[in-house]
Amino acid sequence: MKVLTIHIGQILINKSKKKTKLYFMKDSYSQKLHNLIPGGAHTYSRGDDQFPANAPSILERGEGAYVFSPDGKKYLDYGMGLRSVNIGYGNKEIADACYTEIIKGNNLTRASLTELRAAELLTELIPSVDMVKFAKHGSAVTSAAVKLARAYTGKKFVAVPSEQPFFSYDDWFIGSTVMQRGIPAEMTTLTLKFNYNNIDSLIHLFDAHPGEIAAVMLEAATNIKPQPDFLYQVKALCKKNGAVFILDEMITGFRWHLQGAQTYFNIEPDLCTFGKAMANGFAVAALAGKREIMEVGGILEEGAERVFLTSTTHGAEMSALGAFIKTMEILKRDSIVEHFWEYGQNLMDGLNGIAGDLGIEEQFYVEGYPCSPNYVVKDKTGNVSLAMRTLFAQEMLSKDVLMPYIAVSYSHQNAELDLTLDAARHALKICQQALNDGYESYLNSPVIKPVFRKYN
């Protein structure tokens, strides 16, 4: 078959009669990654289509708030391991705690003492938690929460907010997105969508599916702040209809409050799920909650029908749980959650101040909670623009700041704040010019794309 090859900037496009393939060909590392790993990374958020072309295609190590490419180039990082690193890369205390557990054997034939200590720690720390089941990643525990809710209630539907983009890579959730290839059609009907902060839209789902909704799962807050009574209304509606109220704390856990966003908002869920920042980048996730529900996944009630909840060889790996235990110790000792709020507020004020000075405060602004800020980039007509967002990220990278989004860590201190704001002054001046002249003259990269899209 005749193939036409066209070079555009730093990408390679192969065109044939049947399909067009887009290959990001920045360097040999990128080529090898895509040749060996579908998508070029093991999570789509790390993919080439999520970063401007001047981003490093591969990283060798991290230290504190910085990451390094194999050629030794140093970047101030705000991705922080997809928000999982909350203290800093390569923290020696946590690494030593992890190593101590490795030397003990790391993964034993029966439950380990470290596993028990970690379970005791989480149940003592968070008021809503009576029991916990550990796993290695967030999708495993959110899917386990759905299974447990269905087993407990005998119902089939799960409701989630349409504004919150990701809960699991499993069929029950991905089937509700536009990316349905590979998912049986019957699975796509079991997850229902309502609108966050709109209790009437959730009432409508309960009315449309009477006695059939097993659970409502939502994040307490991310970029959208809950209206004063919304979370309490959701909980009350779940109780009224015999549904399980699940809070997903993958992002909010150990950032909004040491005890999670549930304590920050004073709302107690039936079940909750944690991951990300539990262990400063080590792989730990948790399904936790009320004993009455969690015990459905147990083995002590003789004659009860069993629920195969989660059963993972590496779910209670001692090294990662040792990292979790040490991370919690450091979070408490060094008042790290308070640091997130203080640094984040200073960063928000600084970035918004620069945009205001340039007269583009309506086209670029940082919103949300200081412990987890979110920057928004719009075009001159006021529409959110991925092209302008790519341009901002590109220009931040030109000053060695990697900011695909903002995840604050304890390693972000005053020096990092100054470096960030200096880079932002440069980047936002370029954005100001692009708003007047058109971004095409300034953008040297393909436009970043949403993770959840039907076609490449």
Image: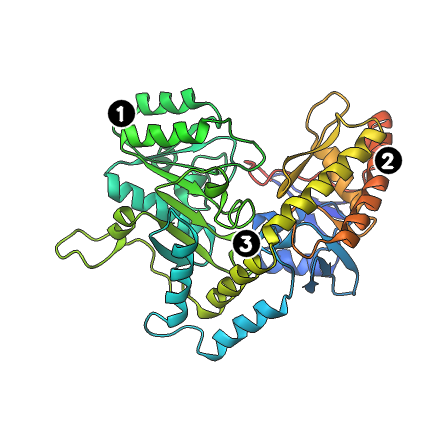
Q: Around disc 2, counting alpha carbons within 10 Å, would you say few (fewer than 14), some (14 to 19), or many (20 or more)? A: some
Residue identifier under label 1:
210
Specify the amino acid type for callout 1: Pro
Whether residue 103 sits left or right of residue 50 in the image: it is: left
Of the image marks 2 and 1, the number of the one nearer the N terminus: 1
Q: Secondary structure at mark 3?
A: helix
Whether residue 39 sits left or right of residue 148 in the image: it is: right
Give percent across and percent down for residue 256. Answer: 55, 44
Mark carried by residue 429: 2
Residue drawn at x 74%, y 51% as measured from the top left: 55
Q: Around disc 1, counting alpha carbons within 10 Å, would you say few (fewer than 14), some (14 to 19), or many (20 or more)? A: few
Q: Nearer the viewer, residue 355 or 264?
A: 264
Q: Nearer the viewer, residue 271 or 438?
A: 271
Marks 2 and 1, how far apart at CA: 55 Å
**Which image quadrant: the C terminus?**
top right
Residue drawn at x 30%, y 42% as measured from the top left: 149
Disc number lying in front (1 or 3): 3
Of the image marks 2 and 3, the number of the one nearer the N terminus: 3
| Marks 2,3: beta carbons within 8 A | no
Which quarter of the figure has residue 135? bottom left
Any part of residue 340 in sight: yes
Q: Is residue 316 above or below residue 439?
A: below
Residue identifier under label 3:
277
Specify the amino acid type for callout 2: Lys
Of the image marks 1 and 3, the number of the one nearer the N terminus: 1
Q: Secondary structure at mark 1?
A: loop
Give percent across and percent down for residue 132. Answer: 36, 55
Specify the amino acid type for callout 3: Ala
Q: Around disc 3, counting alpha carbons within 10 Å, would you say few (fewer than 14), some (14 to 19), or many (20 or more)? A: many
Disc number lying in front (2 or 3): 3
Whether residue 393 sits left or right of residue 277 in the image: it is: right
Whether residue 129 sits left or right of residue 162 in the image: it is: left
